[in-house]
Image (spheres, rainbow, N blue to C red):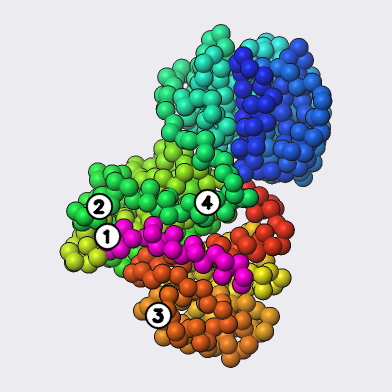
């Protein structure tokens, strides 16, 4: 939540900051701002999107070779010009941008007020920059030392960048529980929440660790120390991120592009891990711990949102194929409910961003309690990827649309590989079943491509239901989590109330909602539950509900009873979610476009939820 970017070097900072903010806008988009240093410190900020900021800056002076920028997802204080970042210190000597929450800000604020400080915004961030200034002036300190001392007094999460007008050749940055990357170019440095604003200038980056403070200056280069003032040796990583991966490439929305990328991203996720000819599955990240995981008492999966839905599918996959008990927990509940975790448990965290605050905290709790931790992330070098004992990336490439699509199918692909690998290790499936699953998995990218050809049909159905105010999604077995995912997709980008339910549970309550105005999406591709699903659909039809069924190609039975059908290729039951989710994604996309919603930046949301 919130994107931060900084530049110091020989180029004009403003265009780099604006481009960077546009790349980071998916992290928050209720206001934006920049601070540019030349002879003076010029701060421009505006409620709304980065384009609103650009308009409001107009022809004002943006010259300067050092600057910082911010795109906000509001926590403390409503989204308006005043609460937008950057924030200045009382004397206007210092300026800060911040991603995170300073939890003890009100205590610090009361103390600062008693020292004569007055504040212009309602933010926790403004309190922090006043604290830094107070400490700096009190001790006559360099800005990096004042930042360090101030951070020892702060409780909470932060990624910050600070400029001191009177010490103009440096930017000071620091992180705790919010991501921060330093890019190292030729005579220039970049600071950003992730690598996307940096990638077109350099592929050399340093990921700051928690409690680290970086000072970048043209004269002295990059210096890193920790909060105890111990010098750290920065580890330089080479990133492999192509610029096309973060561009829309002709699509109107990133979400649309990301839906269509799935045949490729699923294949990328399997590359080098699945060999159909030789008949094996191998997960490099698992090798060292395969024995321990296959002998685990149980696997606990922690995740949020769409990643939690992938976790539910993993419960079916791992229990079904590898016969290891699995529990799936909302990370936000798990971390606060005093869970029982033992050294024989394995805790798997699933997270696209690898930065979700609750998932990270749940993982840290599990680690403290002795469990083996395994991360399934998309963003390379993210906090969860670095904190876990082992893990595997899904290799889906940057996912920028707030609604998760290709990360979901990447996670489910990876979890399918994991389940198969564990099943083979444990001998819970026969050699021929193993081979059959491997062969089918190898077909999935082509089948996803074929499933995408339902687009026109989905669009046609979307026109008929775009004005609904409610929708119900039903599925059984492997398709129950897909029902939840379909409902979440519709809610978050179309603002239509939707609920996902196990189809058989419907008669324990939600059936009361059904009338001729209620569209009911039924995901009916799992063959083993077909007859039962047919009965559930009959129950809906008997109450005049409008049934839209996702079916396997050639399903003559459902063709007769459903109002609309969407056909997709069939597959083995454990892999059905990889195909049945495709029409769900397209449906929410088309309905959102038809309703005039901003698909990539839905209201109130942010891509990466780095606060509790
Ligand atoms: O980055 P993560 O996978 O940890 O994010 C978890 C959720 O915030 C995320 O899946 C969210 O629910 C998406 N907007 C769903 O489309």
Q: Position of residue 207 (x, y in %)?
A: 47, 29
Q: Residues within 10 Å of mark 3 (few under 14, many from 20)?
A: some
Q: Residue at x 44, y 47 (%)?
A: 396
Q: Position of residue 515 (x, y in %)?
A: 66, 84
The answer for how far apart the CA atoms under marks 2 and 4 are is 26 Å
Instruction: Provide the residue designation for mark 3.
Output: 529
The answer for how far apart the CA atoms under marks 3 and 2 are is 30 Å
Instruction: Provide the residue designation for mark 1.
Output: 438
The answer for how far apart the CA atoms under marks 4 and 1 are is 25 Å
- Relative horizontal placement of residue 437, taking residue 82 as reference (left or right): left
Q: Which residues are magenta?
A: 437-461
The answer for how far apart the CA atoms under marks 4 and 3 are is 31 Å
Mark 3 touches mark 2? (CB < 8 Å): no
- Relative horizontal placement of residue 555, taking residue 519 as reference (left or right): left
Q: Inspect the magenta stretch and tell me whether residue 451 lies in it.
A: yes
Q: Residues within 10 Å of mark 2 (few under 14, many from 20)?
A: some
Q: Position of residue 374 (x, y in %)?
A: 36, 47
């Amino acid at each position: 939540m919130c994107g931060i970017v900084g530049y110091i070097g020989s180029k004009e900072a403003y265009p780099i900051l604006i481009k960077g903010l546009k790349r980071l806008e998916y992290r928050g988009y209720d206001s934006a701002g920049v601070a540019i240093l030349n002879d003076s410190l010029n701060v421009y900020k505006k409620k709304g999107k980065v384009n609103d900021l650009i308009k409001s800056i107009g022809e004002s002076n943006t010259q300067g070779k050092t600057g910082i920028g911010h795109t906000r997802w509001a926590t403390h204080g409503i989204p308006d010009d005043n609460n937008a970042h950057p924030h200045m210190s009382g004397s206007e000597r210092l300026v800060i941008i911040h991603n995170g929450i300073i939890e003890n800000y009100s205590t610090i604020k009361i103390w600062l007020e008693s020292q004569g400080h007055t504040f212009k915004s309602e933010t926790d961030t403004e309190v922090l920059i006043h604290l830094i200034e107070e400490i700096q002036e009190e001790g006559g300190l360099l800005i990096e030392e004042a930042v360090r001392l101030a951070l020892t007094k702060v409780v909470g999460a932060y990624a910050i960048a600070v400029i001191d007008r009177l010490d103009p050749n440096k930017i000071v940055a620091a992180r705790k529980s919010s991501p921060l990357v330093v890019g190292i170019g030729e005579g220039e440095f970049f600071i950003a929440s992730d690598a996307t604003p940096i990638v077109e200038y350099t592929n050399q980056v340093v990921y700051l660790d928690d409690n680290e403070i970086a000072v970048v200056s043209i004269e002295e280069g990059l210096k890193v120390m920790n909060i105890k003032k111990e010098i750290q040796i920065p580890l330089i990583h080479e990133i492999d991120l192509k610029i096309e991966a973060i561009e829309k490439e002709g699509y109107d929305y990133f979400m649309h592009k990301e839906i269509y990328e799935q045949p490729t991203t699923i294949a990328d996720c399997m590359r080098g891990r699945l060999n159909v000819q030789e008949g094996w599955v191998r997960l490099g990240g698992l090798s060292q711990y395969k024995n321990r995981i296959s002998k685990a008492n149980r696997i606990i999966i922690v995740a949020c949102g769409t990643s939690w839905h992938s976790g539910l599918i993993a419960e079916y996959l791992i229990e079904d194929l590898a016969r290891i008990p699995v529990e799936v927990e909302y990370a936000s509940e798990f971390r606060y409910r005093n869970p029982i975790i033992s050294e024989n448990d394995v805790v798997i965290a699933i997270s696209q961003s690898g930065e979700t605050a609750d998932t990270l905290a749940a993982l840290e709790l599990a680690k403290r309690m002795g469990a083996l931790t395994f991360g399934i992330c998309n963003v390379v070098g993210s906090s969860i990827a670095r904190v876990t004992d082992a893990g595997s990336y899904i290799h889906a490439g940057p996912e920028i649309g707030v609604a998760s699509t290709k990360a979901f199918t990447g996670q489910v692909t990876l979890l399918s590989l994991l389940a198969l690998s564990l099943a083979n290790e444990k001998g819970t499936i026969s050699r021929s079943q193993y081979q059959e699953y491997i062969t089918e998995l190898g077909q999935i990218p082509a089948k996803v491509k074929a499933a995408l050809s339902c687009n026109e049909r989905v669009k046609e159905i979307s026109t008929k239901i775009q004005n609904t105010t409610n929708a119900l999604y039903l599925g059984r077995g492997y398709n129950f989590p897909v029902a939840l995912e379909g409902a979440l997709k519709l809610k978050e980008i179309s603002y239509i109330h939707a609920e996902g339910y196990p189809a058989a549970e419907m008669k324990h309550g939600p059936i009361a909602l059904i009338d001729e105005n209620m569209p009911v999406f039924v995901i009916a591709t799992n063959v083993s539950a077909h007859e039962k699903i047919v009965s559930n659909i009959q129950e809906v039809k008997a109450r005049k509900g409008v049934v839209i069924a996702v079916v396997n190609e050639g399903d003559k039975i459902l063709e007769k009873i459903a109002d609309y059908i969407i056909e997709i290729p069939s597959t083995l039951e454990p892999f059905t979610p990889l195909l049945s989710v495709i029409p769900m994604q397209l449906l929410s996309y088309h309905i959102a476009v038809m309703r005039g919603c901003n698909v990539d930046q839905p209201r109130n949301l942010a891509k990466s939820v780095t606060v509790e």
